Image: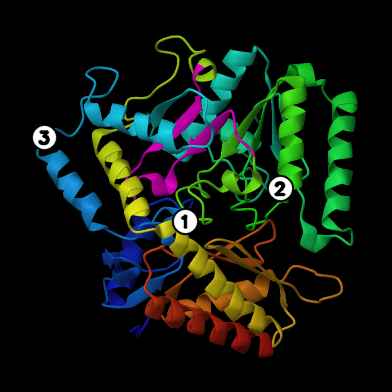
Amino acid sequence: MVTEVPGPKARALLEKKFEHVPRGPFNTVQTFVTKAEGALVTDVDGNTFIDFAGAIGTLNVGHRPKGVTDALHQQIDQYLHTCFHVMMYEPYIQLAEKLNEITPGEHKKKTFFLSSGAEAVENAVKIARKYTGRKGIISFERGFHGRTFMSMSLTSKVKPYKYEFGPFAPETYKWPYPYYFHTKLKPRELDDSLLKQFHTFFLSEVPPEEIAAIIMEPVQGEGGFVIPSPYFVQQVKEICEKYNILFIADEIQTGFGRTGKMFAIEHFGVVPDIITMSKSLGAGLPISAVTAKADIIDAPNPGEIGGTYGGSPLGCVAALEVIDFIQEKNLLNRSVEIGNAFKKRFEALQEQCEQIGEVRQLGAMCAIEFIKDPITKEPNKELVADILEKVQQKGLIVMSAGLFGNIIRLLTPLVITDEQLKEGFEVLAEAILECCRN
């Protein structure tokens, strides 16, 4: 039950936050957690929320899964950190072996670890450049790959991620990514039109012989959960193969069961050369991974990739438990069930609210796009802001996304109960209808 957000204790902490923490870090909910379990979060004032944000897709196995917490307690009693570059430890090797086994492709693979998704992207770029001897990196419009220098350069949203932080990394380029809702073309027509532009790009901007890699989110995350066709992704991979360009799949938000497959790229019939992972890999522990074909990832010499905290013992044991948990609890099927329930509930709501432009999902990666007018499809960021504020006061945590901030995205923990899911859907649906009618 939620009484007031922020409550008196949260307001007192907010005053300290404003005094001691810079304004740069953004906060979705203006309160502070004291306890979290499964898909529920309780704040300092005793308010309990249903979590449809999952720490931006970090908690596919939920808050504090028992297997993970037990493994962490056991690890803490042994050692916390020796730095893998100083004295190695077995969980690092075990996790590398496991990811080599479960990531797409039957080829020989190797894996190493870092601390964040942005670090994984940075190192994937380093590896691609080292292996190919080329410098150019292509990403896609609306894509998000992080906030560090190279990853920010690959990201395609100026505010808040890039504004006045330049100049950016050179030899980075953007390609358009299909957005079927915002075109009058049929999906195949749009795909072919974009693919034609890509071939023109190699004539007008930079030759393919200077491109090391193309990095793609199989489903765009911050971009608004935009889903391409298998044909489009396959054709991009064909371009890569034709010109000996590496294909990097950024699975940082889409990975570990979110889309109904362990990795979203599996929906598209494409095997990447390099794959980056983080977020739900560690159930809330900071860890990221880069897995690649063995000959590619072996291109850097000893000492050229790595990091002091990369693949920390705690992160590794947590990740091993996460993978086991997903498999044992059959969370891939659960992801599909959540997505189907979402689609059924909100496609029905779409008939009552013309401001709902599109309801889309792949597994439990779910989004609702809001517009001002069904003809122009003008983005309705203001409506989304009103809905988010209203649902928070009713005990539901959700987040926005999209280039225009007009999309509500759902990243529910896959362990959410049917009752919690239904209640969260009802809170969201009521808030949507109320705001649409005002």
Q: CA distance from mark 3 to mark 2?
A: 46 Å
Q: Quadrant of residue 143?
A: top right
Q: Earlier in the sequence, mark 2 or mark 1?
A: 1
Secondary element at tag 2: helix
The answer to whether residue 109 of the structure is visible from this angle is yes
Q: Earlier in the sequence, mark 3 or mark 1?
A: 1
Q: Are marks 3 and 2 in contact (CB under 8 Å)?
A: no
Q: Amino acid at mark 1?
A: Ile
Q: Is residue 312 left or right of residue 102?
A: left
Q: CA distance from mark 2 to mark 1?
A: 25 Å
* Foreground label between 2 and 1: 2
Q: Are marks 3 and 1 in contact (CB under 8 Å)?
A: no
The residue carrying mark 2 is 230
The residue carrying mark 1 is 56
Q: CA distance from mark 3 to mark 1?
A: 31 Å
Inspect the magenta stretch and tell me whether residue 101 lies in it. Answer: no
The residue carrying mark 3 is 78
Q: Quadrant of the N terminus?
A: bottom left
Of all residues, the one furthest to the front in this rendering is 106
Which residue is found at the position 90% from the left and 24% from the top? Answer: 203
Which residue is found at the position 65% from the left and 76% from the top? Answer: 383
Q: Amino acid at mark 2?
A: Pro
Secondary element at tag 3: loop
* Local crowd size for mark 3, using a 10 Å CA cut-off: few (<14), some (14–19), many (≥20): few
